Structure formats: structure tokens, C-alpha cells
Amino acid sequence: MHRFFLPADWIQQDSVTITGEPLRQISYVLRLKALDRIIVLDNSGWEFEVEIERITKEQVKGKVVNKKPGQGEPRIQITLFQALLKSDKFELVLQKGVELGVTAFVPFISERCVARKESAAKIERWRKIIQEAAEQSERLILPILHPLISFDEACRSVKQPSLLFWEEEKSVSLKQTLQNPPFKRTAELNLFVGPEGGFPESEKELAKQHGIAIASLGHRILRAETAGLAAISAILYEIGEMG
Ligand code: SAM
């Protein structure tokens, strides 16, 4: 069944009223009809199975026929602090990160970033990529896209256990790190991944000063758009979230 993240106030008791872009999707793109069913999500973690009653030019009216808690959210809340990358690569990290279970994304500008700012239109496009990937991958909570900040601000902002992947780190591995407090069995985790040019030593040191641990992802140098996704997959596997 097609899934739609909708504002919570569009669901009133067992009645759902849909307008705007989702209306266009339902009636013109998917060409759904009365009696067809869809899944509606209001970011509460519940899935509402809705039977379409009627579709007009102005709105879709539906009736909630079933409501159940979904299973699409991982047990760990991962925030991916990703250095701004050339656009198509950044969009790939957003889409795949959502599929894997990322809770929030924080784009940041670091010393070696090639891309250094983004237009409002581009950020709107990123939000659309996140929503579409969340609907496709059966997520229950829409991942958050935080505003673009500097690396320094990103380091100062972290509270939960945080881990920066440094391509020059040779002794401490991700696996070792996950086996020790405060990472072992943590419910929240921040991950930092650098830009195409990597992190200079000075930024690695700045991160350490803010209590951010440093780890390696192994002997091979991963592309910036691969590193975060590989780390997230390894962490989810390690905690038994990969089936
Ligand atoms: N020049 C390549 C590119 O254009 O994509 C490599 C970029 S660099 C290595 C990207 C970021 O990925 C690094 O800053 C780091 O965060 C992460 N990374 C890649 N390979 C890694 C490794 N083996 N260990 C730790 N971090 C790694």
C-alpha cells in the first residue's frame, strides 16, 4: 500500500482529509479510486490504514479502517553529521541514510569542503528526497534535516556519544569503539563523516577537544558518500537491527 506522511491534524478521529501535493499524488499520479486503501503516517509511530471514500479536485476523504504501531524505526537514534558534498553525492547520502534508519542529518561545512553553501530550493529538494525515501522504506518517523552549520558549531553542539571517522586513524576501529562505554548499548549516537578531501589533523583534534571519539573504518579509503552508509550498516548489524 502507498504510504503518506501527513500533518497529524489531517486525521480527525477516524476521518482523514488530504489536500495539496499528496492529493495530486493520489489522484493524478497514482490514479487511486474510492475503496482503494493507503497507509497514513503522522510521525507518532502509528500506521493508519485508510480506505478512500471519495476524491474530488479539492480533496481526498478517507476513513481509518485500522491503526497499528509500525516496526520501521531502529532501536538506536543515529544522527549523521555529514560534511557538505557535491549535490548528487549528498542527495545519495540522504536517500540511503533514510532507508538505513538515520534519525537526523546535520550538514556541515569543514575546511576541505568543495561545496560551501546551498540554495533554499536545493534544501527543499533534500526534504522531498527524505520524505520519499521514508515513505518508500516504511519509516514511521520522518528523519529531520537540520540547518547547515560550520564544523566548529557541529562539534560544540553534540551531547550524546559521538564518533568521528578519520581516514588516517590506524589503531581504533569502529567495532572496538562500539564495545566500550559510552557507545555500548547507547540509544543515541552522533556520527561525523568528512568531505571529499577528508578531515585535516586540526579538525580531528578539535573534535577530540569536544569529547568526540575518533575511529577507523578499516584499511580502505571509502568515498565520502560511502563512509557514513557503511558505518551505519555496520552499527545496525552490530546491535542486531539488520533482521
Ligand atoms: N578522496 C576520497 C573522496 O573523494 O571521496 C576520500 C574522501 S575522505 C576519505 C571522506 C571521509 O570518509 C573521511 O573524512 C572520513 O570521515 C571517511 N572515511 C573514508 N574512509 C575511511 C576510513 N578507512 N576510516 C575512517 N574514515 C574514513
Image: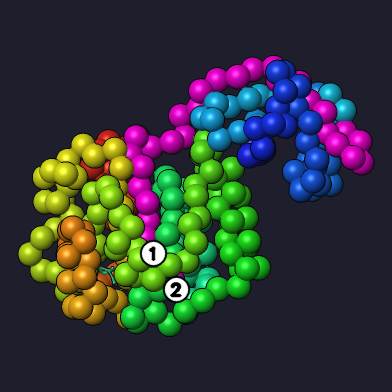
Circle on res. 85: 2
Place of residue 87 in the rendered image (x, y in percent of width and height, measured from the top left): 52, 73
Quarter of the view holding residue 50: top right
**Is the C terminus in the top left, top right, bottom left or bottom right quadrant?**
top left
At x 46%, y 29%, the residue is 71
Badge 2 crowding class, 10 Å Cα cut-off, few under 14, some 14 to 19, many 20 or more, is many
Residue 180 appears in the figure = yes
**Is the N terminus in the top left, top right, bottom left or bottom right quadrant?**
top right
Vertically, is 22 above or below 38? below
Q: How many marks?
A: 2
Place of residue 67 in the rendered image (x, y in percent of width and height, measured from the top left): 60, 19
Query: Tag 2: residue type?
Result: Leu
Between 101 and 161, the one lying in front of the other is 161
Q: Is residue 78 magenta?
A: yes
Note whether ligand 1 is within 8 Å of mark 1.
no
Place of residue 215 in the rendered image (x, y in percent of width and height, measured from the top left): 17, 61
Quarter of the view holding residue 39: top right
Please name the residue that numbered disc 1 is placed on. 82
